Image: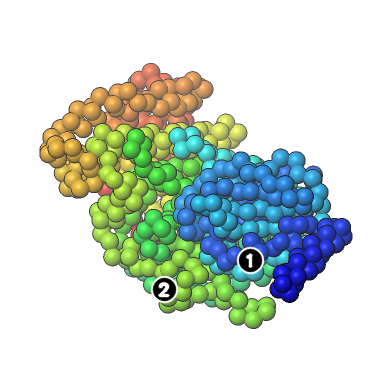
Amino acid sequence: MRNNSFYLRSSCVYLVLISLLIWNGVPLVLAQDYSCEIPSKTHIWISPLNPTTEEPVKIMAVSTYDEIAELILTDDQGRRVVLQSRHRGGPPWSLISTPKELDEGHYQVTANRNGESIACHQFTIGSAVTQPASEKWNLATEAFYAAWIEELFGAPHEENLSFNSLEPVLRNQERNFLHNYLGNNEDKDLPLTPDCADLPYTLRAYFAWKMRLPFAYRACGRGSSKAPPQCEKATIMAEFTRNTSTQGSFKKFSRLLADVVHSGSLRTDFEDESTDWYPIAFKRETLWPGTIYADPYGHVLVLVEWIPQTKDQPGTLLVVDAQPDNSIARKRVWEGTLLYDQIENAGPGFKSFRPLIRTTAEKWRTLTNEELTVQSEFLPFSLEQSQLSRDNFYAELTKLINPHGLNPTQAYETTLDALVEQLETRVNSVENGEAYFRKNPRGIIPMPDRTAIFQTVGPWEDYSTPSRDMRLLIAINVLQSLTDKIIRYPELFVLSGKSPEQAKIEIERHHNKRIHERSVFYTRSDGSRWELSLAEILARKPAYEIAYNPNDCAEIRWGAQPDTEEYSTCRRRAPAQQQTKMEQYRTWFRETQRPAY
């Protein structure tokens, strides 16, 4: 009886306490805080950092363990609503929601899976209290970075997604979860136009700035014909962590960063640990959005989304890259866009940004390869990719993208689509050169010597296409050699009882039909559009070995021959000296083997 009285008195005291809390403005959801203390592999992020009623509040839940079923929002009156959300990933998996017109007050958002709460976060709209900064780089912030990248470049996978620079991407409030995150209108007129190697650094630095995390980078050499690039001691940018970094200071830092980093920064040796990037395991579980792929010749891709294979749809791995003219495009991964080779002067492959840990209150250091091998706070260091031959690398990549295999026709159509996508990107690149000459009709762009045609500065870098054209020639080779791949790697295909030889014959027939049905359009010098079938493009393959010079008219760059109607509108030709150079360098393109620096 005494025990019952004790429980009754305790309950009354508890109810009085709750009533006092509510009476004094403390929200009920904060008084009952047990669910927000659950240790979890799921974390919830709110944007902006200090929400107000003046702009929408965005919510992102990110899990490194499994999918998240739903997000539930509870206000300080105890009213609950299941939020409409977008599912992305994984791993990592994310759920993104933008609730409509939230009033001032206290809120709690809960992530659920299988009917159980797996994460919780509380926030207040209209409070002047500054939220705490992110504590450190760890698996949670790495997963958030991956989910942010995936959302930033998210779109239906069949959509041709491209931008003239990174600026319109980051200024897009719907795409950029961190838009105006600091509440200072800091994204307005923010000038960010990274090129190829700058893009992953710029994205990472932008995220670190918004999340008030440290950032490290190194000055690196470009290597030699016999050795990969080597880097100096890391420069660690800690200003972001002090809550004082303005748009002006970030602009200054981003310009400095662009002046220091280059393609050599990402092609460092696999085992070198004085680097900004380290190789990770060649597995779907570790190839997160935000991971970069550094090819052996200097091009860089940023992974943005995996589209899983289904019964009716092939799988797809999507990446973005930046071009010398600062344009950014999303494209699918295949042998034509992702180049791999084991060469002695580069460490190519999938890599993650080398993380930082705090050593004292004001100091950080980068992790060593050994530390990244044994600890669980980050994606582990791995030499797996360095042990693969070129053919085995592509075979493993094919298995990751389509683990259940494809029938040969599906494989052909996927490859065909990717090639056409690459050609359409080249249309834009050639047109950018034409736009330059419309503004500078009497100008001639100087052509560098030898390997400098691939790596230089100024208008040649902006408007020539030697690297892109070499990748185009490789892409053409991949399509034309698909039937040979069926013979060499039959285990990658679903042959349904057919022999590899039978499948090869069927795909050869299919190929001869489809190349007359697919085409691209380019703009000639007089502004008229000209259609090229894929069959014509394949027949012009030798012309693309010397079609990268912007001083040549668009007709020449698309392989038009003199004394044809197509060629008749051409009004510009590269100087004879430059034509001689291109003939001298032609072997590189014919053999699709970029020379060492």
Q: Which residue is mark 2?
A: 373
Residue ranking furthest to the front: 1
Taking 485 as reference, is 451 left or right?
right
| Residue sitting at x 33%, y 55% | 340
Looking at the image, is 244 positioned above or below residue 393?
A: below
Taking 153 as reference, is 18 left or right?
right
- Please state which of the two labelled residues, at mark 1 or mark 2, is closer to the viewer: 1
Looking at the image, is 179 positioned above or below residue 377?
A: above
| Residue sitting at x 19%, y 42% | 486
Residue closest to the eye, 394 or 428:
394
| Amino acid of disc 1 | Glu
**Residue 395 can be seen in this image:** yes
Taking 105 as reference, is 393 left or right?
left
Q: CA distance from mark 1 to mark 2?
A: 30 Å
- Label 2 residue SS: helix
Q: Quadrant of the N terminus?
A: bottom right
| Amino acid of disc 2 | Thr
| Residue sitting at x 25%, y 59% | 389
Q: Residues within 10 Å of mark 1 (few under 14, many from 20)?
A: few
| Residue sitting at x 24%, y 37% | 408
Residue 385, image x, y percentages: 33, 62
What colouring does the structure picture have?
rainbow
Q: Which residue is mark 1?
A: 37
Q: Cβ–Cβ below 8 Å for labels 1 and 2?
A: no
Residue ranking furthest to the right: 24
Residue closest to the eye, 580 or 88:
88
- Label 1 residue SS: helix
